Image (cartoon, rainbow, N blue to C red):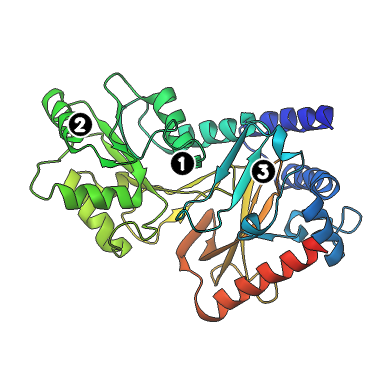
């Protein structure tokens, strides 16, 4: 098993390193990973067999059964014993809530995926950075904290620093970093949770936070009930006005604890922006009640296939509504009404089949 895991890890690292990959190459690797996960991920294997979807019957990545995102809360989804895993990323939530768990025997593939697509999607790099999220030392089970740590280590110039801790925003450090950028004219990048930017703007409404030319911002994750909610159009308008950064340089990263890769847009001059995936990911929109794909351009629940998800499952049914477009997808919001009910039924169906 360890030898097979190592072979698949190297295959994925080589695949991620390719300049691009065509549909046939993506499909072949997706089916290879599917066979591995059906055999070694016990809960997922039971679910797939109950559906009559096995390596003997599935011929295309779009037919690989998708696990509802809340399945990560209900069952253990891991090909290797969890005690052998180097890291466990957990979803955000209160201490009383059941959290989703994503087990990683190694972070090799996760790190390679993040590094490749980040460098291809944001910039200019390297740049002085301010991180608006607690550090990995403070939040070792946060995939976002790990992501931002890599960004800081790989691309942060001298003077880059952590501006937020578990106890909140370090306003003095933020103001000092902004003033340094204003004085020397060097671009500054601020990266963090969407709600962190709201806290920042609310905490310092009178401060001059305008940044030099070439600066850029990256938010991710939405508000999660941790700040006031702002419609996307108003949020990016306020962000641009506060920091003097064109909306084309106000970037958004879409990621999930249950995935091992991220999506990026090319700025938010118009919302909703189009999120783009690397060549080792695919996205489709489905009707949650039937699981069938909806035509491109029509809203549905997003399903992501991420080949970097080696140890869990490649294919995730989210609770996000979106429209698949040529080159990516536009995120419309969370499932409501009949769509939300369809997602809930999918979770119940998954748990019942995977627990049998």
Looking at the image, which residue is at 37% across and 27% down?
125
Circle count: 3
Does the residue at mark 3 contact the one at mark 1 (Cβ under 8 Å)? no
| Element class at badge 3 | loop
Q: Which mark identifies residue 144?
A: 1
| Residue for badge 3 | 309
Q: Residue furthest right?
A: 56
Left or right: 235 in relation to 281: left
Q: Residue furthest bottom?
A: 338
Q: Which mark identifies residue 173?
A: 2
Callout 2: few (<14), some (14-19), or many (20+) C-alpha neighbours within 10 Å?
A: some
Which of the two marks, 3 or 1, is nearer to us in this view? 1
Q: Nearer the viewer, residue 272 or 175?
A: 175
Looking at the image, which residue is at 54% across and 32% down?
116
Q: Quadrant of residue 126?
A: top left
Distance from disc 1 to disc 2, alpha carbons, whole Å, reads: 21 Å
Q: Which mark identifies residue 229?
A: none
Q: Quadrant of the N terminus?
A: top right
- Find residue 200 and report its horizontal and vertical position in percent: 22, 47
Distance from disc 3 to disc 1, alpha carbons, whole Å, reads: 16 Å
Distance from disc 3 to disc 2, alpha carbons, whole Å, reads: 37 Å
| Element class at badge 2 | helix
């Amino acid at each position: 098993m360890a030898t097979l895991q190592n072979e698949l890890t190297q295959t994925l690292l080589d695949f991620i390193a390719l300049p691009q990959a065509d549909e046939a190459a993506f499909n072949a690797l997706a089916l290879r990973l599917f066979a591995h996960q059906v055999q070694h991920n016990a809960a997922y294997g039971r679910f797939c067999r109950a559906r009559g979807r096995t390596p003997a019957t599935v011929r295309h990545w779009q037919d690989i059964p998708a696990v509802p995102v809340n399945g990560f809360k209900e069952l253990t989804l891991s090909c290797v014993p969890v005690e052998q895993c180097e890291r466990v990323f957990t979803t955000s939530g209160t201490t009383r809530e059941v959290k989703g768990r994503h087990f990683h025997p190694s972070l090799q593939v996760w790190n390679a995926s993040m590094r490749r697509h980040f460098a291809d999607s944001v910039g200019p790099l390297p740049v002085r950075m301010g991180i608006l999220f607690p550090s990995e030392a403070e939040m070792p089970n946060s995939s976002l904290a790990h992501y931002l740590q890599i960004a800081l280590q790989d691309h942060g110039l001298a003077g880059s620093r952590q501006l937020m801790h578990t106890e909140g925003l370090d306003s003095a450090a933020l103001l000092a970093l902004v003033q340094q950028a204003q004085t020397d004219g060097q671009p500054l990048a601020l990266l963090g949770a969407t709600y962190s930017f709201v806290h920042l703007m609310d905490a310092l409404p009178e401060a001059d936070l305008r940044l030099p030319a070439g600066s850029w911002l990256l938010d991710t994750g939405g508000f999660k009930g941790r700040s006031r909610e702002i419609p996307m159009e108003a949020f990016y308008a306020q962000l641009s006005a506060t920091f003097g950064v064109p909306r084309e340089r106000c970037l958004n990263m879409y990621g999930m604890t249950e995935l091992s890769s991220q999506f990026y847009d090319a700025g938010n001059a118009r919302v909703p922006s189009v999120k783009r995936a690397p060549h080792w990911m695919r996205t489709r929109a489905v009707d949650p009640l039937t699981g069938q794909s909806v035509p491109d351009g029509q809203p549905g629940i997003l399903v992501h296939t991420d080949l970097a998800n080696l140890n869990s499952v490649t294919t995730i049914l989210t609770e996000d509504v979106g429209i698949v477009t040529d080159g990516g997808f536009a995120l419309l919001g969370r499932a409501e009404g009949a769509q939300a009910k369809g997602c809930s039924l999918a979770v119940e169906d998954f748990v019942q089949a995977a627990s049998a």
